[in-house]
Amino acid sequence: MHFTINGERHEADPDIRASLLDVLREHLQLTGTKKGCDHGQCGACTVLVNGRRINSCLTLAVMHQDDEIVTIEGLGTPDDLHPLQAAFVSHDGFQCGYCTPGQICSAVGMMDEAKKGWPSHVSDDLAGDVVLEDGEIAERMSGNLCRCSAYPNIRDAIRQVWEGAK
Amino acid sequence: MTDTKTLQLDAPIEHSLLEGAPQGLTGKPIDRVDGPLKVAGRATYAAEYALDDMAYGVLVSAPFAKGRLNAVIADDALAMPGVIDVVVDLDTFARNPQQGGEEEAPTQGVRDIDYSGEHVAVVVAESFEIARDAAHLVRFDYVEGLPDVDFDGRLDEAETPPPSQMPPHQETGDPDGALAAATVKVDAVWTTPSQNSAAMEPHASIATWDDDERLTLYG
Amino acid sequence: MKLFDYARADTPEAAVQDMSARFIAGGTNLLDLMKLQVETPTKLVDISRLDLAEIEEIDDGGLRIGALVPNADLAAEPRVRERYPVLSRALLAGASGQLRNKATTGGNLLQRTRCGYFYDTHARCNKREPGSGCDGREGFNRILAVLGTSEACIATHPSDMAVAMRALDAVVLTLAPGGDRRRIPLGDFYRLPGDTPQIETVLQPGELITHVELPAPPAGRQTYRKVRDRASYAFALVSVAGVVAVEDGKIASASLAFGGLGPMPWRDAAVEAALVGKAPGDAAFAAAADALLADAQGYGENDFKIPLARRTLIAVLRELTEDAA
């Protein structure tokens, strides 16, 4: 199988049952994306496929050979951090760091959805402008769990980048 | 009541650990040194070391919550292409090692099963997918007992633990009296689901033997 | 997960050629179940690239929704937000952002119960293994059904989207092997468990959902109310999709569907008959709740769903008729 990940082409020969997550981690040594539950419940495996955030544990790798896949490694490096990665550091949006790549990829996808004007479960008006205050961020990020309780700092990091980008 | 000691921390205290530690850090909002690695997905967790020719292990759980395990039957699992071994030893298989509590060796032996999901064997295969599939083929010979899950019904057997080395600062008031004297009384029982303190990373380990028969464990 | 043959279909007609194959689109429910060997298909046909992802206008302002439209896109679609806000709200109340981006319209209708005994392959479950028994009836059944149950099964259907679609009189369009196309009203799509809880819909082997049609937008106000243990990312204990129109001080029309209560999105004509022609108010609302719950049966841990459903329905009816003409 072949994959386009972070702009580069990769080849791999995994089991037909392999999830996109396991191909990234076990076949391509891209271990930035994490396995937390393997059942689509924790969000640690979140990547961007054609710009949309999805759980990479709940999809077969074989189905994504024609897609543009972006992982945490593609957003930035320790020496050249994406603004959201830098915001997570400055706002201390993590402790153990295991949920962090999934949080960041999910937040990138989420902000794109907000830019498109998508409402959320907590939006008063389905057709109104999107205002990313605390409650909206929490709802839109509810698919990403953090066991170290960094949530308030995660929301601060996201809000900083959202407001900076406006 | 024990004697209460107080200490006021509004000025530097000479000859104290607090003041003797690396200067100028306490109270300062510094970024975590591991931050850039973690946010960029470059920090290496337990299962993330890429060694050559890796095999994959999937743990097998007993299919019952309480009882006696007589045998683990691995024939069908071993016959699956790609399976390297099924590690079974009812007397030496590690039994939920207690974090920090063991001093010489982990508790071993899985003949007596005490909880749902208890691990009793491990399937090792050339890929995760094969190991996971083969784990479903493992069979068991066992005598099932009756698990005791009646917490509320056995509350009368609860014991107060003995005092630990550090006696607690403790004050007990009179809740029954206060409730009896209250103008408005609400007496109800609320329950919450049980909570676990557990970091997101699943427990994992990589084991590798070298030519000198030395074992390195990544954890 | 057991091994399977995998093929990608280029057209719907090609997809339905092999009656023994299972379709995979978003995969967010199927793969979850396959990892646990609750589902063990031997052949998967990938339908995710078929040209079934459009939302088209049909007569009188209705919509035809392709089966592959992702849940997130359907919720955000301006015409859905505008004409069928109950559907948008129901979709937004479900799952997580990541899952909504991947799950499809067709897949959401076909998702399977989250009953813990269905999921646990060591437990007895007539839906997973016909004839084995039902450990849910006497077990931890807090999330299970109080309406439409049988001796064999008390599972609930977990979808929010399907409840809103039921209230909107949606119609499911299919393509069968052999080329026949069917139109199946959603009210006729699901089957009660009876003696065969393993048969959940009227779909034939190999039959593909191609679209869901919504008739012209209904009169009145719409709302979706979901009661659950957490503020987000949790299934409904009880949910209500309601569409109510009031004219000249009387309820002119009412459409109410319920989640969390039964093995399919639940709708009962008797509930609506108790409301139409009556003045909005607690007398009519209580009669509607009585009709809904007349045959409700709790199994111990889910007894609370009965008074909860009553209160939620009444609250929804009050919301939909507040200050209405």
Image: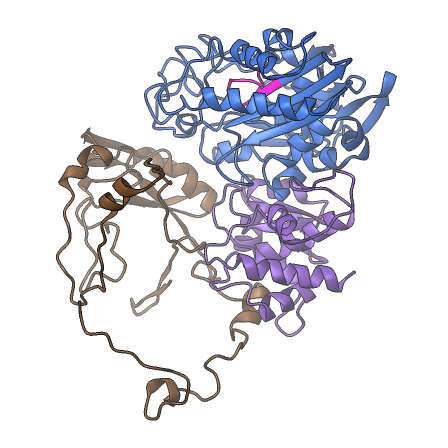
Residue A43 seen in the current view? yes
Query: What is chain B's hue in the picture?
Result: brown
- Report the coloring of the rendering: by chain
Position above or below: C70 against C175 = below
Majority secondary structure of magenta residues: loop
Q: Is residue C259 magenta?
A: yes
Q: Quadrant of residue B205?
A: bottom left
Q: In this view, does C217 lie to the left or right of C243?
A: right
User: Which chain is in purple here?
Assistant: A
Q: Which residue is drawn at 61% across and 46% down?
A: A139
Position above or below: C66 against B32 = above
Image coords of residue B80 (percent x, y):
40, 37
Observer-nearest of B67 and A147: A147
Q: Residue at x 22, y 61 (%)?
A: B170
Query: What is chain C's hue in the picture?
Result: blue
Q: In which quarter of the image is residue B168?
A: bottom left
Q: Which stretch is magenta? A: C257-267
Q: Residue at x 77, y 18 (%)?
A: C218
Image coords of residue C131 (percent x, y):
38, 13
Q: Quadrant of residue A63?
A: top right
Q: In this view, does C206 lie to the left or right of C200?
A: right
Position above or below: B177 against B168 = above
